[in-house]
Amino acid sequence: MPGPDSGEWTYARAGVDRGEVATALAALLRGVRFRPPPASGRRLELPGHYAGLVRVGRETIAITTDTVGTKGLLAEELGRWEEVGEDAVAINVNDLAAVGARPIGLVDVISVARTDPEVFAQIGRGLDRGLRAAGCHLLGGETAVVPELLRGTDLGGTAIGFFPRGRRPVTGSAVRPGDLLIGLPSSGLHANGLTLARRLVRETRTPLDRPRPGASRPLGEELLTATRCYVRATEALAGSSEVTGYAHLSGGGVRNLVRLHPRVEFVLDRWPTPPGLFPFLRELGAIAPREMFQTFNQGIGFVVVARPRRRSELFRRLARAGYPDAVEIGHVARGRGVSLPAEGLRFEGYA
């Protein structure tokens, strides 16, 4: 399958330069110097983690925010909005799950050039599916009509979670060499890497209305598949002394594991063969293995890090919660970063 004439594709070539993003974020954070008084609660210092945590009285609250990004452009092209409505919930509650929090609710935000009742109705049905999967409320939202800023629709949200009495945040600080890595398969690309995927499809003139080789449904529909929700997995494992960390493999791919603990090595020596969509995109754009693993989830959307002594019980709990496809993908070792021995890959950090 031929790739674009100019050779290998990367996320940066498609328009998303991670280095530029990291530099911009560092500049932003240097400008935020204010620290509120103790009466406003105490922030738990977890720089670079999945959710922000603040202690208010005896309660700890988790907050996170994200958007579906350019997946919204695919939804617009296909005229299908339910999947991204579901995404707006899942991408946020999965980040709450990554610190062991139980979702309370979501506040959505929709920015549009103009309002379309049918589009909003579809988004609403998708939000409903996502809220049901996560077991949380829609607490409100904001609709911004900004024709001078946008030509299409941008959709996202902010999710809030808490820690039921007796439950503590799972930050990854307890991760140690010897821990087991359990992967929970993804439902597809989720809401990450769509800028690159869409660019490849456009550059190679690959039709969205026909299945790729080996698939049973159109490529556009496959790319649009809603993000899998992992809240029930972390709820099933809540209270387990074996669990030491969770990782949501969203933007950044396997490098997200570094966010849990920077002074251990996450050895992914049992990574399963990525489902067909991923090798299809790899061949379509002549994408190098390193770029694949740091841009896409490569078939694993969430990782549980745990002591290995009761692995059978962990897998039983996950199966009962709706994740019978959980699979062992590696272990924690002495060292730093993330490695995939079979691919000859090593990632030193998240950024």
Image: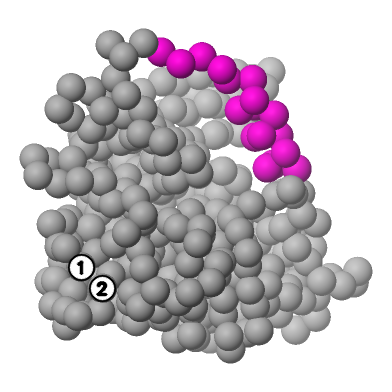
Q: Amino acid at mark 2?
A: Arg
Q: Residues under labels 1 and 2: Cα distance?
A: 5 Å
Q: Position of residue 72 (x, y in %)?
A: 55, 44
Looking at the image, which residue sits at the far bottom?
Answer: 342
Question: What mark, if any, has residue 242 been given in the picture?
Answer: 1
Residue 118 belongs to the span the image colors magenta:
no
Residue 170 falls left or right of residue 196:
left
304 and 184: which is toward the camera: 304
Indicate the quadrant where residue 315 lies: bottom left
The stretch in magenta equals: 20-36
Q: Secondary structure at mark 1?
A: loop
Residue plotted at (42% across, 41% down): 46
- Give the mark nearest the N terminus, 1 or 2: 1
Q: Position of residue 268 (x, y in %)?
A: 48, 79
Q: Which residue is mark 2?
A: 307
Residue 195 in the image: above or below residue 221? above
